[in-house]
Amino acid sequence: MIEVKNLSKSFNDSKVLSDLNLLVEKGSIYGLIGANGAGKTTLIKHITGVFKQDAGEVLINNEPVLDNEKIKSRIGYIADDLYFLNGYSLKAMAKYYAQIYPHWNQERYTKMLTLFNLDEKKNLSKFSKGMRKQASFILAMSIMPIALILDEPIDGLDPLVRKKVWKLIVEDVADREMSVLVSSHNLKEMEGICDSIGILNEGHMILQRNLDELKSDICKIQIAFDGEEPSDLQEKLNILHKEKRGSVNQMIVKGNVTDIAKLLQSYHPLLLDVLPLSLEEIFIYELGGEGYEIQGIIF
Amino acid sequence: MFQIDLRNRMPLYEQIVENYKQLIINKVLKTDDKMPSVRDLAKELTINPNTIQKAYRELEYQGYIYTVKGIGTFISGDFQNSFDVEKANVLKETIKGAVLELLFIGFPEKDLKDYWNEILSSRKGGENNDRG
Amino acid sequence: MKYKASFFSFPLFKENLKRFWAVSALYTFILALGGFLPLIMSSEYKSSWVHIVRVFLSHQHPANVVFLVSAPVFVVFLLFKYMQQSHSTAVIHALPFTRKQLLFSNYVTGLLLIIAPIIINCILLLVIKEPVYSGNPQIDIFTSSAIMNWAISSFVISLFVFSIAILACMITGSSLLQVVFGIGFIFLTPALFSVITVYFNQFLFGFSISDTLEKIIVSTSPLVIMLTHHEVSDKLIAIYFIVAILLLFVSYAFYKARHLETATDSISFNFIKPIFKYMVAFCGMTVLGLYFMQLGGNQTLNMYLGFFLGSFIAYLIAEVILQKTLWVFKNIKGYLIFLIIAFLFILTINTDILGYEKRMPNLAHVESVYVNMHQHDKEGITDPENMKLAYDYHQSIIDNKNILEKDLLSPQSTNRKSYVSFTYRYANGKEFNRSYRIMNDFVKNNPYMKKLYETEEYKNKFYSDIFSIDKEDLAYLDIRSEHLDRPGTLIKDSDEIKELITLFQQDLLSKTHEEFNNSLMPMGTIRLNYLSDSDNEKYSEKPIHALSFSYDYKKTIEWLESHGYLEEFLVTSEDIHYMTVRKITPENRPMSSYVGDRESLPLSTSELMVITDKAQINELLHTVEAYSYYLNDFYEVYIVFKDNQGSYYGYYSEKTVPDFIANYFNNQSL
């Protein structure tokens, strides 16, 4: 379980993370999304025990991560900026990891090696970027982590490889209740695999929720009335955004979807479409509330 | 057994629930058949186990499946009359609206009834062919 | 295999060795290049072993220096490079190690990488060692203990450098600066000390550092000690070792406190940034201030201009390094703070609030005094009356500080300057040192110094090397005149030798202070050749090999004349082809007056006076001075020997020039 409480961090007078809270339950796949520069990598580097916070706590299984080699030996980390020891092959890295990670699983390593079809003897610097990511993934998984942290890992891998990666991750989550924290810009993919979402913007966690709950709490309405729009619509509904295209109203409404649909049906509209928002739309909307121009993007 | 459509806006777990309901209603899955464990299904479909878990809970809540502790999850026998009433109402309204509109644009009433029967019979055909 | 202590990780240690063992091998070879290999390759010619062994075991060989400086710094660079880049720092610190383990495991690896070449070379030398004799008396310098001592001092010195390099690494995020600081910190203390003494020298009248203090400062850097051939005592070795260990703990504190996101930053700790900027500004200030001062002929205004410009430019450079961009003009506030500090610093020294300039020692506790004498090889004045004379002399300098300082700083000053130094040694071994650069006239005319100089005690101690000549050991004397390169007169009779030397010593005793301070051209030099000169070792230990005398050494000259030697070597007008005189004014100074040794005489012109009259030539030979006057008008005499035997220069000031020359040039300007 990964827990961040009231985390604050400044780089030289500019605050990059403000009073941040995050929770990844055991056996959960948590998607961390945010604009570029929002602070995702900084946050992740706190969770992996690299950065020291100015204030707050960073805990994995209730133990602080910083300078804690016991907990770090259970964290699998794929950095956005990959690094391997100079001149090392995957085999050499694996041998090293085998010695320093107490739960290293050589069988798994071999299996994954075959699955991804990598040459373990080749110098890692000679690998393509995608292959280096795969190598990094193999190493991270072979230590049998209880927490897997992926900083924009999947972006850049071909679809076949991506499928393999997710499959392996899901297996570990299912079998061993591994916690996973993924940061990515590929919202469609995240939507399909994450059960929880956290949206980071300018160092603040704007929202953090179970994805299904999030989605069931907000919907997109396309509605056309026969005649005037009912006057009490505004008060009865928590309308977050409204656009009018001809006679059709387009609204984003917060609240229980079924209740909203029922209410709207009661007005006997000519046209009524109640649609869930995709994660991408939720993301754009939430950031739109912070100043992004969302006109026309969502509909 | 079935495909998850990621482009479908229905939440994943709902898609699973609906899909399983279809299979169960159409008798593709028989009473007391064993369901795959949450873990196995998650692995097979490459879907978040929590999502599967949720789907199973919903199916169990709606009475389509039951769990025997330590043994597994199985298909229920007596779901015949259990369905989501609220959802049914919404759908009924939708059908009503659609039918009215069809008539409004000039669709012949007689054809409407034929069409209705066509829908019902195509379901039965699916039942015969789909041995998944 | 999974050996784990809370501060050490064996796998990390092993992996480091796997990655970097080649560096150790390289340095083993480098060290071998200075000792083992040359010895092996010249094993046929054992005589060359003395030099090789002596040089190598005293860390004087380039291989030693390269090893001691670059091995630790390079090893640290390799081991800690991961901290200076953001991707490697993230991955390495995410590995299951604590910072303690990272630091100490890397530290141990580094030590091993450095000590292996030392141990291997030590063993190799022990294997091939044979007795090699050197010194007086002859001792074996190639013993096991000598080799072990070499190994231990090598280890401790490189350990020291290694610890400093690690500390440097902790405070910066740039690999380049890590190396720069690593090497720079080694010389930091002596360098800072030198820079600060520039100001003391400039602003404190009489500033002087005692030798012991200098030795202490120098010994804070083992490399400086090595490079300046000072001895490294056992006590010093122990101190270096302790300091190196302490530095390790300081480094750990820094590592723990370090924000890893400062990888690639120039300096990782905010509190160090101003220190860095101010130190750079301070150095820039000193360098440019000194330079401008020299350019401008000692004017203080130039110096302050140099201070200001130098500090400003250096400060900007430091800011550029820190911020890694050229646009740094916004942060001038820090520079203003520096200016204030620098101003206060100079003001404090200038106003001498601690009373350094006026302070005099407590004569009651003084055991001996040295005036213009190097204290390590001579005895000091101990007679109370004479000590009082020295004291009064010293006091008179201080009393006249204003006049003397003004003269010193005035670019128009035409006075020659001399150095005067005082060292008072107390009974408890402590010293009181002062050293002054003041006008020669003051020294020449000072009654106290005159009295002191002319005391027997002073003469005996000041010229102790001349008075301690072992007359029995003299083989022969070789007397030549100055400048004329012809075979000298030899005196081989031992009685004559003893007589002449004794008379010379008596002349010394009766020499007056005025005579001591005249700048007459020496008349000749007596070269002393000892019986024991053939021994290479003994040669360098002999105190004196040449005695120079001029026209006021009456007894010596009389004896030489009466024994017929004088006319053999003395330069007379017979030896001179001609002389030319030029008057050098500030306008024509740069031009050389070399007209070449010519067969025919040059022509007299308004600028050049040619002298061929024998009487005049004789007069010039006896009175011409050896040193020129740089700052005002003077006369340059060019003396050419007959038969192409060479030439030389002599000088006169306006005051000392013979009338007939002065008249010549005065007539020219009419």
Image (tube, coloured by chain):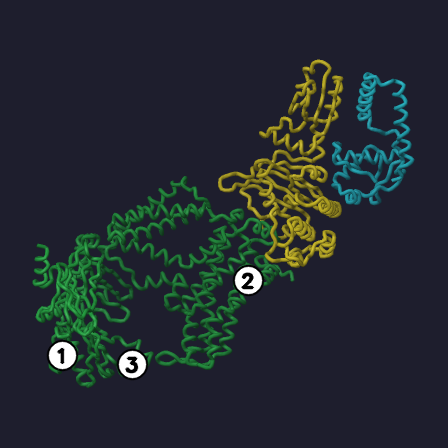
Question: What is the x, y in percent for residue C328?
Answer: 42, 42
Asked whether the residues under the numbered discs 3 and 1 touch, taking CB atoms below 8 Å apart as contact, a structural biologist would say no
Find the distance from the CA under tag 3 to the CA under tag 1.
29 Å
Mark in front: 3 vs 1: 1
- Crowd band around label 3 with a 10 angstrom C-alpha radius: few (<14), some (14–19), many (20+): some
Q: Which residue is mark 3?
A: C533
Mark in front: 2 vs 3: 3
Question: What is the x, y in percent for residue C99?
Answer: 56, 53
Asked whether the residues under the numbered discs 2 and 3 touch, taking CB atoms below 8 Å apart as contact, a structural biologist would say no
Q: Quadrant of the C terminus of chain C?
A: bottom left
Q: Quick check: C243 left or right of C306?
A: right
Q: Quadrant of the N terminus of chain C?
A: bottom right
Give the residue type that dot 1 points to: Glu
Q: Colour of chain C?
A: green
Closest to the observer, A87 or A291: A87
Question: What is the x, y in percent for residue A238?
Answer: 66, 23
Find the distance from the CA under tag 2 to the CA under tag 1.
76 Å
Closest to the observer, C517 or B66: C517
- Crowd band around label 1 with a 10 angstrom C-alpha radius: few (<14), some (14–19), many (20+): few
Q: Which chain is yellow?
A: A
* Chain ID of residue with mark 3: C
